[in-house]
Each structure stands twice: as C-alpha cells, then as structure tokens.
Image (cartoon, rainbow, N blue to C red):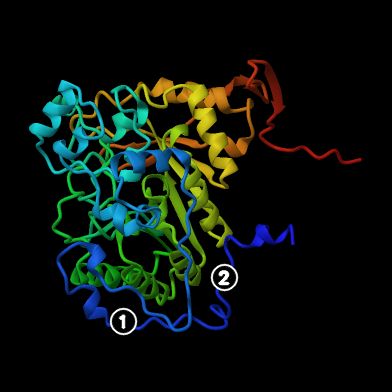
Amino acid sequence: MKNEALFTEEVEPPGIYSGLVQIDFNVEDLFSSHHTLLSYPVARTTGVHYSFRFKESQKSRTFRKRFYPHITSSEWNDWTWQFRNRIRDIESLAQILWLAESERQAMDHHSGSLPVAITPYYASLLDEYDTSQPLRRMVVPTSDEHHYSEGEARDPLSEDHDSPVPGIVHRYPDRVLFLVTDTCSSYCRYCTRSRMVGSNTHSLSHFNTWEKAIEYIEATPLVRDVLLSGGDPLTLSDDKLEWLLSRLRRIPHIDILRIGTKAPTVLPHRITPKLTYMLKRFHPLWISVHVNHPDELTTEMSHACMRLANAGFPLGSQTVLLREINDNVDTMRQLMHGLLKMRVKPYYLYQCDPIPGSSHFRTPVQTGLDIIEGLRGHTTGYAVPTYVIDAPGGGGKIPLLPEYVIGRDGDDLMLRNYQGNVYRYPDCGSIQENVT
C-alpha cells in the first residue's frame, strides 16, 4: 500500500489507448468564431474521465487568497480561467504591483503591436516592489522600450522574406516554421515577433491560412520536420490543435513534429492530462520550452514538465540571454541544473534579437561566450546549451563557442581545456601505414 502513491498521479484512463480516441467535432466549428480561442468546443470523448488535479505551491495559494479571494483552487488551476483573466491594463496591474513611473509611462503611452498580458499565475511570481526583479522585467514594460538603437528592425530575422505563404517560414532545406497563432498567454518584452503577436486578428489561426500552409508543406517533399510556433500553439484549444496535428501527420514525408511553447513556464496548468493523452497520438513529437530564469522553475512548472516527460515527449529548453536577468554564470548554471532535474535538456541559448526598443535587454556577445566557458567542463555537458546568434537578415542560427582550438604545431592541433591547460592532438593530414 505504501507504494501506491507513486502511481496515483498520472494513471491513464482504462482502455484509452486500446485504439485511437474518437473525437466528435466538425472542422468548420473549430474555425467559425473570431472570438477567443477558448470559445472553441471541448473534445467530446466517450467513457473517458480526465483528472485536472494540479499541484498548487504555497506561493500561488497565498497570492490567490490575497488578490483573488473569491476564486477557488479549482478555478485558479484551470488554464482557461488563467487565460481569460490575464492582466492586461495598468489598473489591474497596479492592484498587484507598485508601478514605477517608467512602467506607468510605458503602459499609458503604449505603442506598437506588442500588448501587455500576464497570467495571474505568473504575476504571483513577480516582486511587488522591486522593479529590477528579473521576472518582472521580462513581462512588465518600461519606457526603455521606446528608445530605438541602430541596427534594430521590426523583422530582424527577415522571416517575412522567407515566407512563401502566410504562416510558413522556410529557411532551412528540410524543415519549416509554421506560425499557427499570434496569441500568447503572456507576452515577453523582448519578443522576436513583437511586430505581429497579440494583434487579436487571429489571421494566423484562420482555417484558410492553415490550409494554404499545409498545402505548401504537402507540395514540398524535401520538408521532413515541422515546428509549430507563433504566438504559442498551446493557446489553441485541444480540438483545434488535434485537427492540425492530424493533418500534418497524414503527410507522408513529415517525420518529426515539434511544438515551441512557453506554457509550462507562464501557464503550466495548460498541460492537462487530457492534452498530453491527445498529443501522445502524434509521436515523434518534440517540445521546446522557453524559460529564462531559475525563479521560473516552480512546483507548477515541474509538474507540467513531469506530465510531458512521462508521456514520452523529449523536452528541450530555449533561453534568451538578457542583460541583468540571466547574464552571469551562476544564474545560468542554476537554471540549467534545475531544467535537467525537470527532465528538460538545455538546447539553445539565444543572443537577444535586435527588435526595436531592445537595447536594454541585449548583452555583448562576449558575455554569452564567457557563460558557455563557465559551464563547459565545470558541469555536465547535458547542462551546456548551444549558444547561437539568429543572424539578422535571415542567415539562420550561427553557433558560437569560446576559442578552444588555439593553433597548430606541425601536424599537432593545439587545444585549450576548461582549466586553461594546453594539450596536443596528433591531427595528421594522412595516415602512413608501415609496410613490413
């Protein structure tokens, strides 16, 4: 009996995978509304009960009782409630945080397409008074966003140039980026796609847009890998996401599907058992999680990642290097070690893209190189992400490494290790066999 608790958290409903789960919906219903994505119908299954029990940390519970005293734990842990009640205006935010003048000005005189939206859950992680807190700086705008610097651009990666049809970015030969929505549950102030996310037009998630994108993928047999991004694909309803994945899985030359999301970090309640059971039908399916700071590694995020990992999804992290947020070795080491404990493999460390008004977030490239050098050899290689610049102008991801190859001496390659010691490797141009 004492071991039964080990198996009570994620018990699959009996018989759910004796065959594919039958979902009863009409595709036209999925795209008939121009309102919030939450208005789409919930998948209707027969004889299947899903438990949405979620672990609520003491910090969340205290915050909920203070600022949402009439909201039950069940409502708080319902992702649809979190999404509907995102904090989006200065009046709502000022009830939770003391706002500095710079923050008030930024919200009062907001311009551009990137709105403010913070889930109540993520708001519970923000410091009430400290405007320099890393998590707060990532989601609360400041007047620094209005200061534009040389080299910044609305579309710094030239994604629009590499878009053969709306919603598709085809830059690399065998894979495409499929932008399936312009909606996020929370908006990062350094967002690469600040020009388009949060537009509330839902143009990217329109049926006709998806159909043309899928037709392009079907007509391009070189493509074997599709990355769903946006916006955040996990703001879509289960039904709509399932329909999309089903259509892509029917394309013979598609080997791998991927989802890029920040839901486990800012809206972990979205990772319901029902969602994971549905997604399991589409393996191999990889999930990349956007996470930037150790303080984001909460009980709730751990629970969300556990559900995904237990369902067999390989998890990788994507982290953006940000000034005075995670731009030192100690913070990055804590983050990478914490991710590994959640079964998330550190994947990419991105140099911050030069979108308009991002200079206060960007670090010198040398900072990133120093961080990688401070990790390499000092911790497991699993904890060392690949540091990349996504080259402005559409050059793609270019990896950066500290200088470990320091030269040659004859046929010997001279190498420097993590301690600074120099070693030789016999790197002969050809191998001479001794014939006797």
Q: Secondary structure at mark 1?
A: loop
Name the image quarter holding the C terminus: top right
Quadrant hosting residue 131 = top left
Q: Is residue 230 visible?
A: no
The amino acid beneath tag 1 is Phe
Q: Is residue 247 visible?
A: yes
Say which residue label 2 marks: 12
Residue appearing at x 18%, y 35% in the figure = 153
User: Which mark is drawn over residue 25?
Assistant: 1
Q: Secondary structure at mark 2?
A: loop
Residue appearing at x 29%, y 50% in the figure = 70
Number of dots carrying numbers: 2
Percent across and percent down for residue 135 are: 35, 32
State how far apart marks 2 and 1 are (Cα).
23 Å
Frontmost residue, 321 versus 9: 9
On screen, residue 191 above or below 151: below
